[in-house]
Image (cartoon, helix red, strand yellow):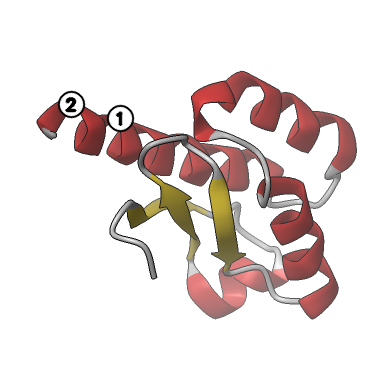
Amino acid sequence: MKTSEIFVSGYARLPQGITAEEMYTVMVVGMIVDRDTGLILDAECSLVTDLAKKFIKELLVGKSLDHITEIEEALTQRYFGSARKALISAIKIAYEKYRQVLSES
């Protein structure tokens, strides 16, 4: 692992009545990010199905947190699961943590 690799996460409340909420109550998104480039190297989220987790991972890995608007647009245009709002919120919170790390460096 390179010293420029950092871990950031974000949490958001899930909507009531969906399977993920029954299991977790909150959405968590964790990402390994290159501090120098903003590149997302790996990502994981607390969606229920492996297919949904894989889909989100593939949407995020290779993107830059420095382009958060593009990430949000990709999720809005391609992910139509019930947890979309919570997922976007959790990613934005992780982005804010990433920005905080940069400002403290």
**Residue contact at pointers 1 and 2, CB within 8 angstroms:** yes
Label total for image: 2
Please state which of residues 13 and 48 is positioned toward the viewer in this rendering: 48
Q: Amino acid at mark 1?
A: Arg
| Residue 3 point in image, percent of width and height | 28, 59
Label 2: state its secondary structure: helix
Circle 1 Cα neighbour tier, 10 Å, few/some/many (<14 / 14–19 / ≥20) = some
Q: Is residue 12 visible?
A: no
Please state which of residues 25 and 2 is positioned toward the viewer in this rendering: 2
Instruction: Say whether residue 9 is left or right of residue 26.
Output: left
Circle 1 residue: 99
The quadrant holding residue 63 is: top right
Residue positioned 70% across, 75% down in the render? 48
Circle 2 residue: 103
Instruction: Say whether residue 68 is left or right of residue 84.
Output: left
Does residue 68 sit above or below 43 in this rendering? Answer: above
